[in-house]
Image (tube, coloured by chain):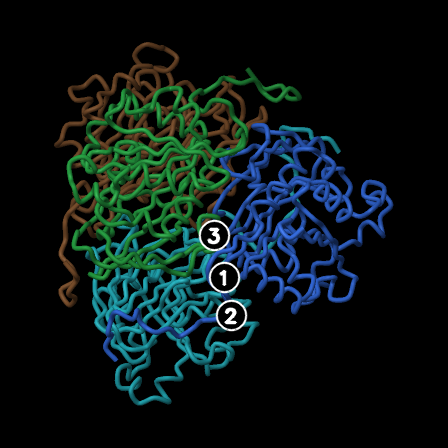
Chain colours: A cyan, B blue, C green, D brown
Amino acid sequence: MADKIRVTVWNEYRHEKSDPKVAEVYPQGIHGQIAAFLGANDDIVTQTATLDEPEHGLTDEVLANTDVLIWWGHMAHREVKDEIVDKVQERINNGMGLIVLHSGHFSKIFRRMMGTNCSLKWREVGERERVWVVNPGHPIAKGLPESFVVPHCEMYGELFDIPTPDDLLFISWFQGGEVFRSGVAYHRGKGKVFYFAPGHETFPVYYQAEIQQVITNAVRWAAPVCGPYTDLTKAPMVSALEEFTVSE
Amino acid sequence: MADKIRVTVWNEYRHEKSDPKVAEVYPQGIHGQIAAFLGANDDIVTQTATLDEPEHGLTDEVLANTDVLIWWGHMAHREVKDEIVDKVQERINNGMGLIVLHSGHFSKIFRRMMGTNCSLKWREVGERERVWVVNPGHPIAKGLPESFVVPHCEMYGELFDIPTPDDLLFISWFQGGEVFRSGVAYHRGKGKVFYFAPGHETFPVYYQAEIQQVITNAVRWAAPVCGPYTDLTKAPMVSALEEFTVSE
Amino acid sequence: MADKIRVTVWNEYRHEKSDPKVAEVYPQGIHGQIAAFLGANDDIVTQTATLDEPEHGLTDEVLANTDVLIWWGHMAHREVKDEIVDKVQERINNGMGLIVLHSGHFSKIFRRMMGTNCSLKWREVGERERVWVVNPGHPIAKGLPESFVVPHCEMYGELFDIPTPDDLLFISWFQGGEVFRSGVAYHRGKGKVFYFAPGHETFPVYYQAEIQQVITNAVRWAAPVCGPYTDLTKAPMVSALEEFTVSE
Amino acid sequence: MADKIRVTVWNEYRHEKSDPKVAEVYPQGIHGQIAAFLGANDDIVTQTATLDEPEHGLTDEVLANTDVLIWWGHMAHREVKDEIVDKVQERINNGMGLIVLHSGHFSKIFRRMMGTNCSLKWREVGERERVWVVNPGHPIAKGLPESFVVPHCEMYGELFDIPTPDDLLFISWFQGGEVFRSGVAYHRGKGKVFYFAPGHETFPVYYQAEIQQVITNAVRWAAPVCGPYTDLTKAPMVSALEEFTVSE
């Protein structure tokens, strides 16, 4: 157990309760479906957390025991409390991975980590999306074909207002004439952040094999590395290397 | 006039009033000295703004007429109002350049733009710093030697908790055994951000020719480019490329 | 004159002589058309060079007096002599800009600078290409709209086997279902390299205003910066900083 | 066995035979020492290859069965045959990892992969080197302290003429006043390249625990990912996405 990656799947969990179409596609909630396919892997254990739980389900204990946090939100970004966002940001900085999905581009935590507005163009007509792999040697590309099609998806188009990614994984093509950097990876502090665009509350995207492969790969990539630096929220005064005398 | 780069030099301006040693080095304030050497260039016009002015001197009108904002702060980062930080962030996203100096690494606006904690190691014994140019073809390296020495400087050392820079310009060597990524450049939205570490309130760093050259180069690099996208704070719904019919 | 950017437009110049369709579109050769629109700018002077001239028109004197070299080739990449490629590479490393167009992705000089195979997918049915700007604050994006359409173009598709660009400027959408990183910028040594995909020998792409704007912007961006380091082909032995005694 | 990472350690293997001081430090050759500490890991199997073997020990069969190639060379870079370099480059492009050590910065294969001259400054007085970790969440930083000292090392100093790394791992400080990007990582094609500077033929650097940790981490990072794209040396003509008719 000790070596398994501990994933917490966070979901706003409002659409599923208010919209029968969403409930039909995701009867256990989007978080339930994501936790289910991730949990089927031997090296991953999952739990879930949702907006309307106390502290949005993200207590200090939950965060301390999370290696990778997955984030799905859409209509209630503003209801997420700033003090929870502060704590999540500090955990990422100290090593936790964050995977943000689809409409989570406008979540407080993603905008906080990026420093930009994270805006984009969009169109919701169920058009075809084709996802191209552009960094084939990256661990998040493992097991994928050169490209794959999501038959019906919400269009997300450029300009996607994000910082230059450390690694650009996927570029999506949309039927109506747009492109989108749909898989982008970042190092932030001791942690890592991955944003993946495909996914929607009324299309069964999270049942598609390639989508599940990407998110599973991303969990493994984003898991903390046991490296140096104990607390990145400190700015310590330090002494000079012993062997030298520096002028005072 | 119309084509000149309009620079606003912002300074916390507290040290100069409370510490005679600082006042002696910078009798017109650090902002006064920076505005003076920048303003000596034909293509640059300067104004200044300080913390204790109404709206910290950064009114809507001032921001609308600023191409590049230079930021110096140290002891009073917390006194900068969040609503001013919000406005500055939005202006950067829409094209304004930001140049952050030395202890400004812990300013609200820099941390906001970076998304990380921006912590570092430090030591204040007036030791020697040697700044090495590591991107010699970049416009911010124009006119510089391979390396230059700042005779007495506060040490800032790694780990500098910042995102991977788009362009790494300078790496500093310190007498006591540390290194520091002392010049880092970022694209953010339509704007640009440059952080430059050398500089201190009691050392005459901003009188040094190479330091002035770097800041002047950075102003020219960070000046807005008249490119596409009118307002990056919007996420517009768009129609498909006319020539195509997409399934609805 | 001294301050103008000196551009040499190199063209294989075979298609124009062997294929009447190409000659009709580019009666002065592709190099002639590119030199014409660039030369209309006050800050740029142009000359041309072609494969069948002695030393491919790239004598030591021509290279020494070239700030930015533009490269167009297609069917005769193998005929370019390795010793000329060596000299061009050394000039780039010491500051000259290189702009590679369209089928030049498979030129010896581009593959040499990239270190990868530079392969891609392609299809030649005259389909529609839509070019999206994804780095709107970059000087190469100056004056462009959010996207523009090339009505008929050869498709170039991912995977484009290139190193991660320092700056990704453009992503192209193609009618048939592909995407392409169609504008990519690199620092190499003291010089800069820009690759721009749109352009073809039988489509009048180099007469289109946006295409001309991009290439003109790229020339200004790629012009040498007068920075440090005299000769990057040397690996000099150096002494320690005077102030220190290091153990021998 | 099938899942183990197959490492081939290549060594020029000349110094050890000509210089008794080198033979004393590395009686089995530098390749022998590196293969020994790597082979002590359960997930790694090693073999070695040297310059004076037929085909430099890098036959088609050896390359086909190598997941990660480690390269050490110094005085005989020119004796490496170009056709072997061609084959190694093609293997990297198709997924093999390459780890280049110390004076290998001037090897044909590293310069080929980088596209730049790979020159640097150097000084050989056995001074102290301090290696700082600047990307603490990267798998190559696993298990390392914030910094570590190599007591006696050859100085390698900036400007290191390399492309902007995809990931900058380490920056070294040298006693005499220089800094160096001593750990840099790149994606190239489907493969990965890591350069690590510390290491020398007469200092026992490859016996130091932190150095062994870095190289072991790098092997795991550079091992091939089983991702898409079968052969990156091809530029295939492709058909349009079935669902669309594109103008011909």
Q: Tell which of A93 and D142 is nearer to you.
A: A93
Q: Tell which of A23 and C59 is nearer to you.
A: C59
Task: Give SS at disc 1.
Answer: helix
Task: Give SS at disc 2.
Answer: helix
Residue type at mark 2 is: Asp
**Residue drawn at point x = 66 percent, y = 59 percent:** B65
Q: Tell which of B84 and C172 is nearer to you.
A: C172
**Residue drawn at point x = 54 percent, y = 76 percent:** A81
The image quadrant that residue C36 belongs to is top left
In the picture, the quarter occupied by the C terminus of chain B is bottom left
- Badge 2: chain ID: A
The image quadrant that residue C119 belongs to is top left
Task: Give SS at disc 3.
Answer: loop
Q: Foreground mark, 3 or 2?
A: 3
Please give the residue where the numbered disc 3 appears in the rendered image.
C142
Classify residue D85 as left or right of residue B167: left
Q: Would you place residue C140 above or below residue B204 in this image?
A: below
Q: Position of residue A18 (x, y in %)?
A: 37, 89
Residue type at mark 3 is: Lys
Q: How dense is the environment of label 3, judged by Cα within 10 Å: few (below 14), some, or many (20 and up)?
A: some
- Badge 1: chain ID: A
Q: Which mark is residue A113?
A: 1
Q: How many callouts does the rendering have?
A: 3
The tag earlier along the polypeptide, 2 or 1, is 2
Q: Position of residue D69 (x, y in %)?
A: 26, 33
Residue type at mark 1 is: Met
How far apart are labels 2 and 1 at the CA level? 19 Å
Q: Tell which of A189 and B193 is nearer to you.
A: B193
Classify residue A19 as left or right of residue C189: left
